[in-house]
Amino acid sequence: MLQTGVKRTLIAGALCGLITFNAYALDMDMKATNDNAVTVATVQAEKVPFTKTIIGHLVSPDEVSLIARVGGFIKAKDFTDGGFVHKGQLLYQLEEQPYKAEVEQAKAQLQKQESELANAKLSLKRQARLLKKGSTSREAYDNALNDQKKAEADLLNAQADLEIAQTNFSYTKITAPFDGRMSFAKYSVGNYVDQSSQPLASIVRMDPIYVDFNPSETLYVANQAGKDSFSNVTLKLKLSTGAVYPETGKIIAVDNSVDSGTGTIAVRGELANPDHKLLPGQYVQVMLEKSAANKSLLIPQRAVVMGSQGAYVWVIKADQHVERRPVELGMPHGKQVVVTQGLKAGEQVVTTGLQQLDPAKKVLIKQP
């Protein structure tokens, strides 16, 4: 009986030790599994619209400095500083009397030369008839011919003088070359101005208005379509107040070279400005938008690791192991990023727990 009791005690002790060992082993196994616990995201294929915001500034399509092309005192100023004017509207009137007198003088000189030419022609005809009859010398005929040629030259000179006088007279009126908005006047009525004076004022066209900005070379290349750059890209403006300008614009010009110092290229957009709310010189945020033609692969940005040889992600394999895979990235899209090469739709990439990953160990996928 004693031996039987001892045997039972030994068996009970062995079982207790085995249970303790198995519990320890299970705890260690669970600890190892938890160490490899990760969250994942599935690679999605979606149509991703292109969006990008760049700082730009507004530019007038036309800006003209008004200068005096003849000398004279300012007789009248017919615009409001900062006001709107129409094409052909009189802006400045310079004293015109001296130039009007020059026009009349040139007209009189022209009439005189016309008369002298008529007399020279009659004289030549007379000398031609007399020469034919032998009643005059060849020298007299040649003199008459030279007088006519001189009269013709004098007439051309008189016509040119009249044209110059009329042009100078027209310069006493300075008119608006297009519809636009005036600057402040630099000279008031009574001031003397001439070609050496500073511009009297300037005028800018307000509608449409241009916006100039400088996207990166990478962005430029990414949005090329054949020979066209930024094709089908529209733009909106965000003002300094944070408000979005209601009109939608388009890109109308791209410069012919990349600035090697900054790695950017000059681009110009155009927007309607019917209410003249936008002013040249304003700084704005240019929001570029382009609808997607094809689907792109998207993954969370936090799944991407930047290594010495470029970007890579950890991909879940069928056997619950992980594979490090290099990828090529496109444009960011919110908290996601476009993958252009290296992944397929439906694959799973690790998004958390990336630091402790070991390709030799299985991972436990947990819910995010």
Image (cartoon, rainbow, N blue to C red):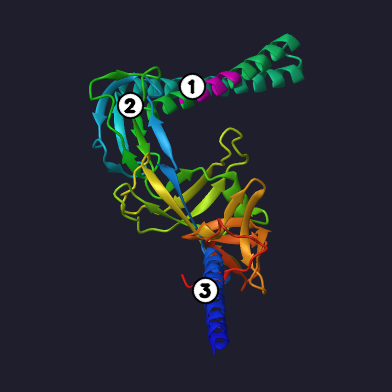
The residues tagged by marks 2 and 1 sit, at their Cα atoms, a distance apart of: 28 Å
Measured from the top left, where is residue 360 in percent x and y? 68, 63
Above or below, 137 against 251 in this view is above
Specify the segment rendered in magenta: 153-162
Q: Residue at x 42, y 58 (%)?
A: 248
> Disc 2 marks which residue?
200
Estimate how packed mark 1 is, as few (under 14), some (14 to 19) or many (20 or more) residues with alpha carbons within 10 Å: some
Residue closest to the far front: 2
Is 239 drawn above or below residue 94 in the view shown?
below
Dividing the picture into quadrants, the one containing residue 330 is bottom right
Residue designated by label 3: 20
Q: Nearer the viewer, residue 135 or 350?
A: 350
Element on which disc 3 rests? helix
Pointer 1 residue: 161
Residue 73 within the segment the image draws in magenta: no
Helix, strand or loop at disc 2? loop
